[in-house]
Image (cartoon, helix red, strand yellow):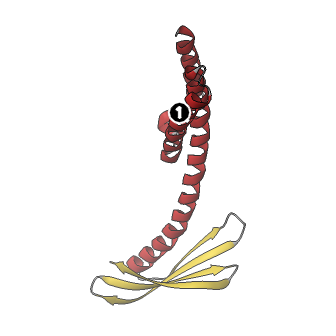
Amino acid sequence: MNKFIAGLLLVCLILSGCTTVQSLSTGTKTGAAVGAITGGILGVVIDSSNPWRGAIIGATVGAAAGGWIGQKIEGRESVAKSKEDVAARAAKDAAEMNSAVKYSRVTEQGIIEDIIATPSNLKGKMRTVTVEYYRDNTLIATETHYVEV
């Protein structure tokens, strides 16, 4: 039992030196928790002759793998959300200023994208805004947003 406690403390010491829990993203924390639980259970089953050792090794490896996977998944989601946020922000700014706005960005592939939002009709508190997407100066899509002002 003393070896188990010493091993557990050693693992905690090693992992605590990497980063603080507060600085980890939600995806990383969730992935690490799921990975640790799954790895611990699998470790007990695989190393049935010494279940404590299997649980510790499985939980450690599972937490590391799960945290890495959770961080990668959350990173992809934030990229997708940021694309939507740029268009929504452009539409909102255009509606509030009653003036066309243009935002530019460079994709991960190095392609230049421009978003141009142009306000038009105002009906009550809702302003119609046309959002155009350009890629390398070529129009690729057009959307209509209705923004409350």
Secondary structure found at label 1: helix
What residue would you read off at disc 1? 41
Quarter of the figure that contains the C terminus = bottom left
- Residue at image coords 61%, 72%: 104
Q: Position of residue 57 (x, y in %)?
A: 61, 27
Which image quadrant is residue 127 in? Answer: bottom left
Compared with residue 41, is residue 129 higher up or lower down, i.e. above or below? below
Q: Amino acid at mark 1?
A: Ile
Q: Position of residue 7 (x, y in %)?
A: 58, 16
**Nearer to the camera, 60 or 141:** 60
In the displayed structure image, the side of residue 117 where residue 147 appears, left or right: left
In the displayed structure image, the side of residue 148 where residue 138 appears, left or right: right
In the displayed structure image, the side of residue 22 where residue 104 appears, left or right: right
Compared with residue 128, is residue 54 higher up or lower down, i.e. above or below? above
- Residue at image coords 40%, 86%: 128
**Nearer to the camera, 146 or 92:** 146
Residue 145 in view of the camera: yes
**Nearer to the camera, 55 or 145:** 55
Compared with residue 98, is residue 69 higher up or lower down, i.e. above or below? above
